[in-house]
Image (tube, coloured by chain):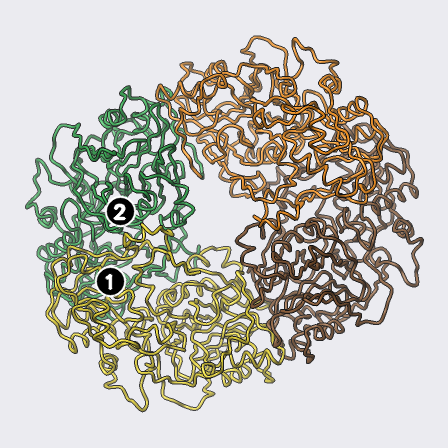
Chain colours: A yellow, B brown, C orange, D green
Amino acid sequence: MPNCSELDDDDMNADRLREECGVFGIFGHPEAAAVTALGLHALQHRGQEAAGIVTYDGARFNSERRMGMVGDAFSKASTIQRLPGDRAIGHVRYSTTGETILRNVQPLFAELDSGGFAVAHNGNLTNALTIRRDLIRSGAIYQSTSDTEVILHLVARSRKHQIVERFIEALRQIEGAYAFVALSNKKLIGARDPLGIRPLVLGQLDGHYILASETCALDIIGATFVRDVANGEIVVISEDGVESIRPFPHQSERPCIFEYIYFARPDSMVHGRSVYNIRKRMGAQLAHENPIEADVVVPVPDSGVPAAIGYSQASGIPFELGIIRNHYVGRTFIQPTQSIRELGVRMKHSANRAVVEGKRIVLLDDSIVRGTTSVKIVQMMRDAGAREVHFRISSPPITHPDYYGIDTPVREKLLAATHSLAEMRELIGADTLAFLSVDGIYKAMGVGARNPLRPQFTDHCFTGDYPTALTDLKGADIKAQLSLLAETG
Amino acid sequence: MPNCSELDDDDMNADRLREECGVFGIFGHPEAAAVTALGLHALQHRGQEAAGIVTYDGARFNSERRMGMVGDAFSKASTIQRLPGDRAIGHVRYSTTGETILRNVQPLFAELDSGGFAVAHNGNLTNALTIRRDLIRSGAIYQSTSDTEVILHLVARSRKHQIVERFIEALRQIEGAYAFVALSNKKLIGARDPLGIRPLVLGQLDGHYILASETCALDIIGATFVRDVANGEIVVISEDGVESIRPFPHQSERPCIFEYIYFARPDSMVHGRSVYNIRKRMGAQLAHENPIEADVVVPVPDSGVPAAIGYSQASGIPFELGIIRNHYVGRTFIQPTQSIRELGVRMKHSANRAVVEGKRIVLLDDSIVRGTTSVKIVQMMRDAGAREVHFRISSPPITHPDYYGIDTPVREKLLAATHSLAEMRELIGADTLAFLSVDGIYKAMGVGARNPLRPQFTDHCFTGDYPTALTDLKGADIKAQLSLLAETG
Amino acid sequence: MPNCSELDDDDMNADRLREECGVFGIFGHPEAAAVTALGLHALQHRGQEAAGIVTYDGARFNSERRMGMVGDAFSKASTIQRLPGDRAIGHVRYSTTGETILRNVQPLFAELDSGGFAVAHNGNLTNALTIRRDLIRSGAIYQSTSDTEVILHLVARSRKHQIVERFIEALRQIEGAYAFVALSNKKLIGARDPLGIRPLVLGQLDGHYILASETCALDIIGATFVRDVANGEIVVISEDGVESIRPFPHQSERPCIFEYIYFARPDSMVHGRSVYNIRKRMGAQLAHENPIEADVVVPVPDSGVPAAIGYSQASGIPFELGIIRNHYVGRTFIQPTQSIRELGVRMKHSANRAVVEGKRIVLLDDSIVRGTTSVKIVQMMRDAGAREVHFRISSPPITHPDYYGIDTPVREKLLAATHSLAEMRELIGADTLAFLSVDGIYKAMGVGARNPLRPQFTDHCFTGDYPTALTDLKGADIKAQLSLLAETG
Amino acid sequence: MPNCSELDDDDMNADRLREECGVFGIFGHPEAAAVTALGLHALQHRGQEAAGIVTYDGARFNSERRMGMVGDAFSKASTIQRLPGDRAIGHVRYSTTGETILRNVQPLFAELDSGGFAVAHNGNLTNALTIRRDLIRSGAIYQSTSDTEVILHLVARSRKHQIVERFIEALRQIEGAYAFVALSNKKLIGARDPLGIRPLVLGQLDGHYILASETCALDIIGATFVRDVANGEIVVISEDGVESIRPFPHQSERPCIFEYIYFARPDSMVHGRSVYNIRKRMGAQLAHENPIEADVVVPVPDSGVPAAIGYSQASGIPFELGIIRNHYVGRTFIQPTQSIRELGVRMKHSANRAVVEGKRIVLLDDSIVRGTTSVKIVQMMRDAGAREVHFRISSPPITHPDYYGIDTPVREKLLAATHSLAEMRELIGADTLAFLSVDGIYKAMGVGARNPLRPQFTDHCFTGDYPTALTDLKGADIKAQLSLLAETG
């Protein structure tokens, strides 16, 4: 229910890309639900709208799905006690497909002929609507509007006998990006799409295997990192240990570069790289590509901080906190009257005038989406007395929307899709504006230049080079054929 | 979550039969949801655990399902505003099959190939588990553990094109008792099972047709009663008016006699009979069958009141309120310590000593299930100084469980199934004990004696004469084949 | 926050007199708070807006005060556990003076020089505003807008040393009606005003003394009735037992007659009289005073039932439930649109047409206040087909407001204060209308006729004969001198 | 209800000093309550346990007081609408004296002879218990256990006529630290204690005067800073403008140095100094006093960041985020079992191994209180592979508790009060440990060295040199004379 009159005008998050989800699973731990709640808490940055946990206790699947933060939804002992069992999967959600209503909160569950089956998904399926329509025609009933539910139906309708075989049969029918964790009454299963667009790691705690979107979910509970799940790999964890299955033809991996730019936590290791160090290198590379004379480097908090440190170290210009973040902010505040709105209230950030006044500042952010907050933050610096504002972005211009689990606006709303660099600078009101180049970001990633024939990363947001078919997008207005059910739940 | 240490020892309701559900539907009224909420409020006695309403607004189905009372769940304007549309169906629920969790709260909804379809059900299907198992084997995914959901799947899988045809095809496959109201994007549909076990009436408000479980749901909104929906009849309400379909071979109706004894509201007319008058006649018939010399007739409130008035008028013994009900009672109270429990706290009823002391009383109740509360209420009368307690029950002994939507305990827990009349009297502690005879209840119903070949009413609880096949019951432990999902919702 | 558009048009309670409060106290019981919660639950009919309990655990006073019903506010074990101690007082409230906000919920508490002191009050002080103004002038700070708080300040400012002496000194300064229970760190104190307007009884449970507004609060916990506290008596309960103090000059008692007519529970004994039997006698006396030929006697539920039974037994006209009450009603429902309102929705009561149609009915209610609901209920009977409606009221016409703890409207709003009998009948739409006479009600009370020099009961609502000075009422707009604090709490 | 088994073992905040409160007031603004809510939001770091606002609307005082954050308690339009009026005061609270229960949440209000009076307080009165005891002896009744309430009683009992005179008379009787904002029906009043221990600034928004604890509360609404309220100054704001009163003999100001070290927001200006710059200078001075060879400077987030930047710039050692803070943390989490606790879960912070591993780190924090979290954070660095950990504290050792509004543990629990530097280093597990010197902090403040005869700042926590009498502390167990009331409210 976004409310237009909320006081979030200066909300730096309002113009961010949104991550879609985080997943976690553990097998064989006596306190599986509690450990999963902790793991999800460490993944909270990947989705704050809802969270869910499903456990299996040897007789029965138990599910708790809630709107809101993990720390609110799963902090009570009574909630955890309703989740007995030594195996669990969990999910944090920021909705990209399907409304965020309780029916859509994952893990989703189905009672199959062979027993219960629960699944949680990070990513987005690009042919889900097409499959959904076909299944409804043959009598399937959907319990949600989530794209993830198609996998349940495909598994349910498979004629195979083993749950892993049924799951693989289903995976062969779907397109797009996914990191799945799934739970049957015998097995914990993880799966990454053939290109490895979304991340998934394997860890271990006291001998019990764990699957998680990021290594920070291992760190919070003191688990050890075993390895990344490979692109196109299915890992099956049971009482017999871990089995690895590779049902797809081999391809080079092509992970999403935005995990490094914005989504992953700075203390996570993604594909063997420190996210924090990569961000610093993006900042340093930006300083090399776009040197400028200035007095201070000011990050847009918090995501711009590592790149700003890198920029400062590479350029020798001092790093300073020129913008202070208010840590006590929820999403919304008073619905104010017009007169309050005209005050230009700054709920979440404020300028640190003592640092900014009279200075030439390099203002560093990680990306520009619509540009609306960039306008405000540059203005905030000028209001605080900045002499010059040199706006630097530690990634290339975003010119294309995502369809793999990142919530981007339609193309027309992407600032860089419709404006030249000069127009953007003018609109944002900066003295100078510069982005990191596409090759610069590949350099920062340590892979030399971009290989245009077989790019090392999923980077369509900067290049328009989508790595998979976009089946639903080509279908003629599929959405219009669903008479959706609105439910507050 | 029944809590054994709740202070409901003297709860007269704890040992009652539970009604399962009430349904309501309206077509074409500009305030369909508000009218439905009022209708459900009048049907609240049929189910207090949950309530739900689905509307269709010409583009979209809207659903609100909540735990708790209608007056709590649907009293806010904001809730009603989330239910736009001029056609609606609603449901109040006391769970008989399926846990009372939000997923099980009706109306249930499915997105079909032909559009959305919502259904609400009063009754119980006696082959639901059998059908469910078969459908899961062929890949169906269930969203609830409710028996009602099978009808959705049967409709979804029908190869017919028209929604009414698909619904009828589904009805042909189910057994048991049902009064359905269903809503498609074009039609409001009502259906009663071939024997008409559960009630359903047709009404009209300002030219808009209404379906409801009882006439009291018409009275609350000033609607007029049109007629009972017949046994085995499907009524289809659309912009073209009402259409009546009779897809089943003709049978005599055989409505559930318990609607008269206990479930229906006294001001409702059921099959043309005043429930209040029938209860008075049961009391009068009881006085004729079992005369006794006494000073006062005391009803067990509130359900025993009409029969007690009838008994008093027939016998000439004065009617007095010897038991006072506390109107301010929720379901539970303090979890007390042993010392509190030993006080014998009476939360919901108390003896009116001024009426009882030194008197010979005829204590009148409508039925005995387990007998646990009968023991307490007779003791309460004795504690208040009653000289003699003559316990009279205005229906026959309950010897068999129900499978058509009434929540009865298993046979072993039914007092009359395992005790002789003398044993029951002894156990309950009454000076005398008498039940209305089976023929007496038929007499009170105005149909002369019971026709043993073709009984006029569904009366298996007294006779063991079940009117339909009990398919699931014959299946070998079907339940064990489901690994149910526990969810708080 | 009464909302004009609530659907309570046909709410029979909307036009009722409101009782103000009930009090309870117990000394020495190991589970004092739990027992008090049960006692308050039995007194719930005396006040449903708020409830509170204060205990003393030997070191510390503990207080829980809540809006809403006892069963909601004090049903959790955790709430009771926050109230340790073997002595407690409690209060249920319907506000007459002071807004119902948490600060005003009783028991009120003060930290005195001699230790803590808590007090709960049923009644109303007629010089509270005068005293309050004087005390504020000398520097007192009020924590509430309740009239009860003056007693705390008077006790706090007393120069006496013993708490009982200080309390008595305070009582000497107040006027009006009161039944107090108070708790110090050593004693439980009860007090009734010199005329005994409001009731208070002494009971015993396992040797522990109890004070309560009505005997029904003893019955719920199986306590025994010891005696009524006398008018003008102070009872002091301590580890040494009960002490009785009579600080006021002797007067005859003059209890409020409305406890018998409407407020007390029918199973309570008030001053040695059964409330139920008194009500039946009022109905019988009414039949003698105003005989009429009719087919049925119909009570307005629930308060009119005992008088209707009495009327029926005296007149020989059959008693029937012609109006059915919906037991599942909260206070409010949907804020409807105009079109819903025009339906004339009946949320709480409905006509039992089978009883009413074609009949000449005697409609029996206990009192008429504004008359608004009488109009509706007579109309409801006519809509249900009543041939004649003879409206009978089992008490005299209310012509004067109360100032002793009953919430009556101002005089201009009292129907009988501004209309003749003929005008009332006309307005209400009954065929005939008759009230019980003043002498008739004294006869029903068993005291012969009213003694005009020294009336046996407080009956100013019928006679204008107020038993005490009305000091505040004579003061020139005292309220205007307070700049009240609004707080939701 | 602090729960010992909460998962906050690694909670960096658990071992912090707690600020007590923040205050805000505005006069003449049409949206006074909304503006006050925003101002309090900017002061949220000064108190997160409760918040309150009182407004005056020309006729009536309106109050809303709530547990929890401003953004939760005052974010709804409906709450603000219950606070009409063009003048308001507000308060955020972290309890130092008096339990945090609703009765203690400020602003406190009293109905005086002259009209209503509300007051909000940042600081602590060191003779409040002594005054309270005296006032209770003469009949005063307290509504809270807050030290602030004495000011209300002193004002209420003053014989002066004007509210400002009464307030000043009250101020003359109290000792300790205070910044008050008060509201009468005519005036908004601000007051700072004679030494100016707690801060208070005067601002202006569209010509309407504002009082606030810090300048950041002006910045959020775009108000301009006018000046600091002087030590010992009373400012009276009315429709006639601002009046300044100096009722106390002149003294040099002596503001609390902890506002600079920890409490004030880095973007605030306190007494003309940028808090951010002072913190950087403390870090730089620390680098000068205690140079060390190392690879990286790592701040303990977030309060150690400015000092770490200062240290890095002064020493030339690179600044890096070696500890990552989880932004999605509430106060508590699952009550874990022993096995979960043994995981050493890190809910709020985690090591950034890529920065720390194999490095010699300067770990920079602003202070050490009990030392418990220092032990954990040093261990976290070692677990992440730090080669050397040099712990540096940007303020002197805390050896004495505070009595002026900062929540410090008793002296025995202060690590530096009972351990030598060597013992502390040993216990904490650092390779080296160094604090900023007392003279060093005065140098960083820009006032040269400390003047021992007349210290420029309130610094007793480091020196034991308390600036005022500690009357209550000298009284023989004053607390024992209060029989406190426990209430959840």
D96 relative to B70, above or below: above
Mark 1 to mark 2 CA distance (whole Å): 33 Å
Give the quarter of the figure containing the N terminus of chain A: bottom left
Q: Residue at x 69, y 70 (%)?
A: B151
Where residue C345 appears, x then y in whole percent?
66, 46
In-image side of C261 versus C138 (left or right) = right
Chain identifier of the residue bearing label 2 in the image:
D
Residue B197 position by quadrant: bottom right
Q: Residue at x 55, y 76 (%)?
A: A481
A329 relative to C369, above or below: below
In-image side of A202 versus B332 (left or right) = left
Where residue C234 appears, x then y in whole percent?
55, 17
Instruction: From the viewer's side, name the closer residue of B320 and B478.
Output: B320
Residue B251 position by quadrant: bottom right
Q: Secondary structure at mark 2?
A: loop
Which amino acid, mark 2?
Leu
Asked if residue D94 shows in the view, the reply is no
Chain identifier of the residue bearing label 1 in the image:
A
Looking at the picture, do discs 1 and 2 lie on one chain?
A: no
Instruction: From the viewer's side, name the closer residue of B121 and A372.
Output: A372
Residue D22 position by quadrant: top left
Q: Can you identify the residue that label 1 sits on? A: A377
Where residue C229 appears, x then y in whole percent?
61, 19
Where residue B242 appears, x then y in whole percent?
74, 65
User: Callout 2 environment at 10 Å: few (<14), some (14 to 19), or many (20+)?
Assistant: some
Which amino acid, mark 1?
Ile
